[in-house]
Amino acid sequence: MKSTIAFVGVGRMGANMARRLKEQGYAVTAVYDRHAPSAKELAAEIGASVCTELAAVTAAADVIFTVVTDDASQRGVFAATGDSLLVKAAGKTFINCATISPAVHVEIEAAAQKVGAHSLEACMASSIPQALAGTLYLMCGGDQAVFERLKPVLTELSDQGKLLRYIGPAGTAGQVKALVNMVMNINTAGLAEGLGLGATLGLDPKMLLEVFSQTGANSRVVATDGEDMINRDHSCYFSAAHAAKDSGIALALGVEKGLSLPLAAATKAQYDRLVALGCGALDKSGIAELTFPARKGTGG
């Protein structure tokens, strides 16, 4: 028998993951979101109950996914007192998908174990379309036995398990995800500067993209972000605000180990600047607004 599923956090990613599991025959019994209209809309679509209390989410399912924003949000849904997913959670399993500080994943696992529950981090290195298609790249951390038990549901989200990776104990997947996003953000900032400088020199930006794609300047963001930077189409798949937050997670890991990360620091400064300009809700490709001539961040 398939596990019953619930979701805490049904924004772009969480909602599409819920839709995917529903399509694959899982009973998605309950949803919760601080933005109540999002929860109500999704619940009506997939036949789930809307919960207004976290404890009710735990009561409604065997496996509860959390797809929240940051460290504070993750700690908030697993609070030690008051309304919390940990209320009467014995025997339940939590799959935590947020990009948060690795130490918080360790905290949550310990808190879950204390009440007889289980926890697994399932860090995602993909975006909204992949969540709906079930082709997320999932990096998992925690007890390996818990990971093995959850493979059936995780497989439905990761191209039938082809994109599913067990990393190690709690916190290790969070570390890898921080590094993935650090490098991705650096590549995105570098592409924006290259295209911006090229535009200033009067070079054809589409020609530059083609050349970049065939040379050492290539990276995945050339394909995913290049055209958007040129066309100023910054429809959000991964926000500039999240890029700033995630760059900060990597920088904090560097500080813990006494390591200087000047490129990550410069990238975070650029994304912080974009947020300060009121553009944090743009896609990360919006960093080009700081480098192309005559755009918002360059005096235009």
Image (cartoon, rainbow, N blue to C red):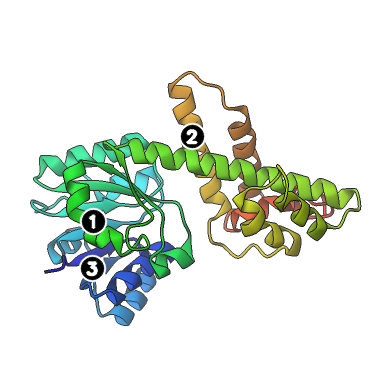
Residue ID for mark 3: 51
x and y percent of residue 174 in the render? Answer: 37, 40
Badges 3 and 2: C-beta atoms under 8 Å apart?
no
x and y percent of residue 170 in the render? Answer: 27, 37
Residue ID for mark 2: 250
User: What residue sits 8% from the left and 51% below the top?
Assistant: 90
- How many numbered discs? 3
Q: Earlier in the sequence, mark 1 or mark 2?
A: 1
x and y percent of residue 237 in the render? Answer: 53, 61
SS assignment at label 2: helix
Quadrant for the C terminus, please.
Answer: bottom right
Q: Nearer the viewer, residue 37 or 197?
A: 197
Would you say 204 lies left or right of 56 here? Answer: right
User: What residue sits 66% from the left and 41% below the top?
Assistant: 270
Residue 169 in which image quadrant:
top left
x and y percent of residue 139 in the render? Answer: 36, 47
Residue furthest right in the image: 202
Residue ID for mark 1: 151
Q: Which amino acid does label 1 sit on?
A: Lys
Task: Estimate the spatial distance between the alpha carbons at disc 3 and disc 1, rounded to whole Å.
Answer: 26 Å
Task: Estimate the spatial distance between the alpha carbons at disc 3 and disc 2, rounded to whole Å.
Answer: 34 Å
Q: Which of marks 3 and 1 is nearer the N terminus?
A: 3
Badges 1 and 2: C-beta atoms under 8 Å apart?
no
